[in-house]
């Protein structure tokens, strides 16, 4: 087994000492990079890119060639799970993801096919093992999934949504149907993530991108409860090393206390939460990840540097030296100049030394 040359990302997640703050970017492989657009054109379209092991590996590594990142993230999508459940994922130019079928009734849920992560999503497992060997211990590899609630919004709406009308209607009118769907998704996601860990993923992130659209009681009942079920079912150690788990609920900064109770190792925050306050709340019980506004990367070099330094000042305001991973508060957008992530990443490494040295 190759030894990990840079493990500061895993160390910070487990609140062990680090020499400098680890940093990666959600959606770090993507359309803002010309080399990504070139590989996607070769693959034909986005889904073919995900399903081709060699191309998926290539685009995972592209941001690591440009920037001094402390982690790689598997190139795939959260919607591969509903696709494997027979919903028929497709992308229409400029319109985001769509499904041929939707889930709206008790019968729709009952008719979902049996799921086998290793065979139904074998292309994901192939990508994980190929990327892991290509990394050759340079940095750890993150595996991921959507949360049951976030996956359910796409399955019920049939694609992206602004108001989640049908999903919320199901939640308030026939909650038992939504619970049946979420429970089944939690089992699928647990199996899917354990298969990624088997294939070589060294940390896991659960993307609960739309948890923040829920009212506070409903967040606990319809999103957090099912993430907790997943966390309890995950393999947490492999080859003598812990496999840390990160929960990222966008818009969820106010729910840190109940999140800690899930037993996850770390929580992602978006840019609306003051990091110094969140670090005080968590008080050494978990690690935090985030939370630069991705739009910061539209600014000048000087303004990016200034925002990053203020974020680090907040992260280390309470004299706690580890348990923090720098990231954006959500995915990097396609309109970012590829020169700008370097300013973000290098500033994190250079400036954090004053707190950690
Ligand atoms: O972070 C990474 O670099 C790994 C790859 C990754 C993608 N999607 C690639 C992708 C990850 C971790 C995701 C997660 C994902 N996918 C989420 C959760 C994270 C979040 O942003 O909240 C969600 C909600 C999705 C669903 C999804 N996939 C949407 C809404 C879209 C279209 C949005 C857009 O930017 O057009 C996708 C497509 C997608 N997934 C792209 C990429 C690089 C763009 C597709 C393209 O190349 O045209």
Image (cartoon, rainbow, N blue to C red):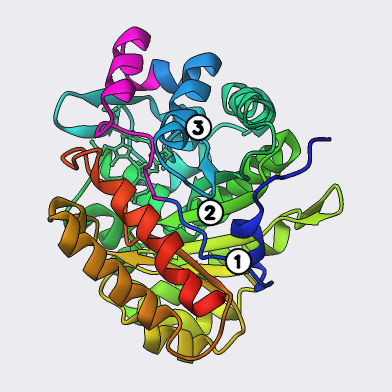
Residue at the spot of label 1: 19
- The numbered mark, 1 or 2, whose residue comes first in the sequence reads 1
- The numbered mark, 3 or 1, whose residue comes first in the sequence reads 1
Q: Which is more foreground, mark 1 or mark 2? A: 1
Residue at the spot of label 2: 205
Q: Residue at x 62, y 69 (%)?
A: 265
Residue 32, by quadrant, is top left
Disc 3 from disc 1: Cα separation? 44 Å
Q: Is residue 213 magenta?
A: no
Crowd around label 3: few <14 · some 14–19 · many ≥20 (10 Å) = some
Task: Name the quadrant of the N terminus.
Answer: top right
Disc 3 from disc 2: Cα separation? 21 Å
**Relative image position of residue 3 (x, y in whole percent):** 78, 42
Question: Left or right of 103: which side holds 52?
Answer: right
Question: Left or right of 135: which side holds 313?
Answer: left
Q: In front: 51, or 221?
A: 51
Ligand 1 within 8 Å, label 2 CB: yes
Q: Is residue 172 visible?
A: no
Q: Is residue 206 visible?
A: yes
Q: Residue at x 40, y 15 (%)?
A: 48
SS state under label 1: loop
Q: Residue at x 32, y 67 (%)?
A: 270
- The magenta stretch spans which residues? 25-47
**Relative image position of residue 242 (x, y in whole percent):** 76, 58
**Relative image position of residue 159 (x, y in whole percent):** 26, 39
Q: In front: 212, or 68?
A: 68
Crowd around label 1: few <14 · some 14–19 · many ≥20 (10 Å) = some
Residue at the spot of label 3: 85
Task: Name the quadrant of the C terminus.
Answer: bottom right
Question: Left or right of 239: which side holds 316?
Answer: left
């Amino acid at each position: 087994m190759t030894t990990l040359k840079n493990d500061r990302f895993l160390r910070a997640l487990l609140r062990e000492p680090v020499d400098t703050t680890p940093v990666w970017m959600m959606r770090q492989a993507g359309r803002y990079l010309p080399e990504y657009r070139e590989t996607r054109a070769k693959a034909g379209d986005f889904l073919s890119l995900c399903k081709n092991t060699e191309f998926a590996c290539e685009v995972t590594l592209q941001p690591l060639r440009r920037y001094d990142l402390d982690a790689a993230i598997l190139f795939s999508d959260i919607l591969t799970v509903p696709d494997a459940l027979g919903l028929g994922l497709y992308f229409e130019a400029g319109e985001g993801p769509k499904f041929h079928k939707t889930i709206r009734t008790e019968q729709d849920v009952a008719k979902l096919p049996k799921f086998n992560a290793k065979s139904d999503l074998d292309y994901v497992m192939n990508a994980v093992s190929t990327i892991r060997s290509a990394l050759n211990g340079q940095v750890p590899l993150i595996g991921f999934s959507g949360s049951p609630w976030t996956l359910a919004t796409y399955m019920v709406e049939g694609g992206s949504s602004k108001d989640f009308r049908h999903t919320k209607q199901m939640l308030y009118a026939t909650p038992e149907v939504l619970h049946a769907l979420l429970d089944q998704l939690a089992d699928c996601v647990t199996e899917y993530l354990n298969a990624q860990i088997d294939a070589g993923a060294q940390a896991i992130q659960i993307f609960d991108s739309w948890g923040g659209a829920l009212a506070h009681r409903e967040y606990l009942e319809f999103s957090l409860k099912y993430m907790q079920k997943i966390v309890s079912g995950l393999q947490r150690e492999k080859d003598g090393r812990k496999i840390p788990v990160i929960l990222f609920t966008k818009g969820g900064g106010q729910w840190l206390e109940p999140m800690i109770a899930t037993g996850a190792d770390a929580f992602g925050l978006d840019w609306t939460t003051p990091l110094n306050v969140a670090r005080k709340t968590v008080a050494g019980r978990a690690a935090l990840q985030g939370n630069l506004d991705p739009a910061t990367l539209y600014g000048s070099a000087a303004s990016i540097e200034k925002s990053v330094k203020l974020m680090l000042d907040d992260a280390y305001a309470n004299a706690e030296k580890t348990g923090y991973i720098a990231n954006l508060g959500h995915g990097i957008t396609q309109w970012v100049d590829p020169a700008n992530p370097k300013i973000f990443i290098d500033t994190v490494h250079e400036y954090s030394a004053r707190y950690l040295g």
